[in-house]
Amino acid sequence: MKEINSEDNIEICNEISNPNKGISNLRDQLDVLDYQIVELLCNRFDVTNQIGQLKRDLKMDVLDQKRELEVLSRIETIVKSIDKNKSYENLMDSISQIYKSIMLESRIQQNKL
């Protein structure tokens, strides 16, 4: 269990006296995370477009169900290893849906190449 020091007490008191500041700080953190997520998604789509180009050149199907299942399995392993809230089941359902959407959008982009 973490010991609470005087700085922690000041921060807790500030958040209690001004709860909007606590929300604002958390929203600032979300803004940074959103930027990072978008940047990573752009990079991911760049790579999947390169893969799509290669698939087109090699006359391969865009959909590779085996690969998508491998990705989902790998993501599940990652979630299990970093899930700090131990809410694995709910978190995995959400992240799985997000990844299915990402892979669908990747296929849509690849089909346009």
Image (cartoon, helix red, strand yellow):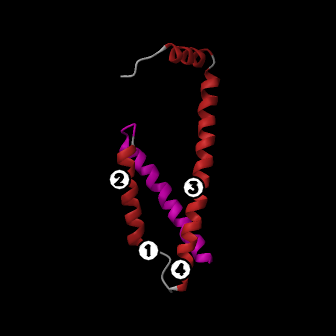
Q: Name the residue under label 4.
A: 54
Query: What residue is shown at x 58% (from left), y 64% (from top)?
Result: 45
Residue 101 colored in magenta in the image? yes
* Span shown in magenta: 84-113
Residue 87 colored in magenta in the image? yes
| Circle 2: residue type | Thr
Q: Where is residue 74 in the image (x, y as percent from the top left)?
A: 37, 58
Counting the numbered discs, the total is 4
Query: What residue is shown at x 38% (from left), y 71% (from top)?
Result: 66
The 10 Å Cα crowd at callout 2, few under 14, some 14 to 19, many 20 or more, is few
On screen, residue 43 versus residue 66, left or right, reads right
Q: Name the residue under label 1.
A: 64
Label 3 and label 1: CA atoms lie apart by: 22 Å
Label 4 and label 2: CA atoms lie apart by: 28 Å
Label 4 and label 1: CA atoms lie apart by: 13 Å
Tell which circle, 4 or 1, labels the residue nearer the N-terminal end: 4
| Circle 1: residue type | Asp
Q: Which element is circle 4 on?
A: helix
Q: Name the residue under label 3.
A: 40
Query: What residue is shown at x 50% (from left), y 55% (from top)?
Result: 98
Q: Name the residue under label 2.
A: 77
Residue situated in front as seen by the camera: 76 or 57: 57
The 10 Å Cα crowd at callout 3, few under 14, some 14 to 19, many 20 or more, is few
| Circle 4: residue type | Leu
